[in-house]
Amino acid sequence: MVLACFLSAAIGASVALVVGGSVERAQRHARVRRANGVFRVQTGRRMVALTFDDGPDPRWTPEVLDLLHTYHDHATFFLVGRNAEAHPDLVKAEVQARDEIANHTFDHPDLELLSPPAVMREIESGAAAIQRAGAPRPKLFRPPKGFTDEVVGVLANAHRYRTIFWDLTVEHFVDHAGVVEGIQELLEKVRPGSIILAHDGGIPNRSRTVHALPLLLRGLRARGYRVVSVSQLLANARRANVAPR
Ligand SMILES: [Zn+2]
């Protein structure tokens, strides 16, 4: 009942803002928009989570799975429901490899531009597609591009999701510099509890990401880091919700 009241109040407030324009809605909530999400966890253990967004994609996902297998590491895949539906064999391969499967919506829209019912449909359809492809019901959620606001946060919480952001992005380091130099720079910024974002799908060519992955996995190992799923990282957290630097 309390949750229901909170939900309707929060959604009501946001509907009013949508009338005033979605840009205004996004700006007004700039400060609270990421308040409930996890960027990095505080832990004394040298462990990090590696996350892949926007897959599964037959061009990149099989190679990513092969590399994770080679290095005995596990990742968390934030799947786009539409892609899970198109490639259930790859979802099953991720499950069989004991990687974690998480929800990245059905169609990858900018959620803050959608009405509350449309946001709800994106979250629910994403989970349904993931389950139909053979994965367990996801417990973690990541809004596309990290764009979220109060409505998205409330609806994700209502669906019992933990919202996961990141503190480092592989493509940020390797897409505009040499892969070796880029990964070196990224490794210098990694800290215990970091959540690293990479992509195994989406429109851009991800060959640089795939090319960088062995360097990243070897570099993390050389620095004494274990690569674990986000849920494992959260289980080892003293505090989870640390803003990026
Ligand atoms: Zn995405």
Image (cartoon, rainbow, N blue to C red):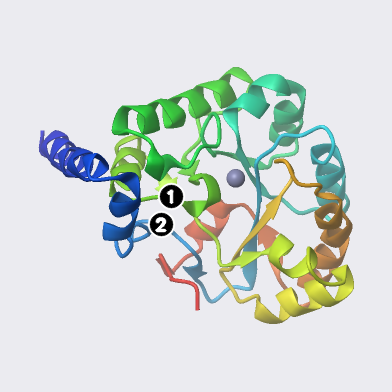
- Residue found 78% across the figure and 63% down from its top: 175
Which residue is tagged 2?
37
Instruction: Please identify the quadrant where the N terminus is shown.
Output: top left
Q: Residue furthest front?
A: 20
Name the secondary structure under disc 2.
loop
Mark 2 → mark 1, Cα distance in angstroms: 5 Å
The residue nearer to you, when weighing 176 against 84, is 176
Would residue 163 be seen by someone viewing this image from the given angle? yes
| Residue 76 in the image: above or below residue 101 | below
- Residue found 76% across the figure and 46% down from its top: 204
| Residue 107 in the image: above or below residue 63 | above
| Residue 198 in the image: above or below residue 41 | above
| Residue 19 in the image: above or below residue 51 | above
Q: Position of residue 168 (x, y in %)?
A: 62, 67
- Residue found 29% across the figure and 45% down from its top: 21
Residue 182 located left or right of residue 85: right
Q: Residue furthest bottom?
A: 188
Q: Are marks 2 and 1 in contact (CB under 8 Å)?
A: yes
Residue 27 located left or right of residue 97: left
Q: Quadrant of residue 198?
A: bottom right
Name the secondary structure under disc 1.
strand
Amino acid residing under circle 1? Thr
The residue nearer to you, when weighing 221 against 125, is 125
- Residue found 29% across the figure and 43% down from its top: 151
Figure disc tally? 2
| Sooner in the amino-acid sequence: mark 2 or mark 1 | 2
Q: Quadrant of residue 81?
A: top right
Which residue is tagged 1?
163
Residue 95 located left or right of residue 177: left
Q: Position of residue 82 (x, y in %)?
A: 61, 25
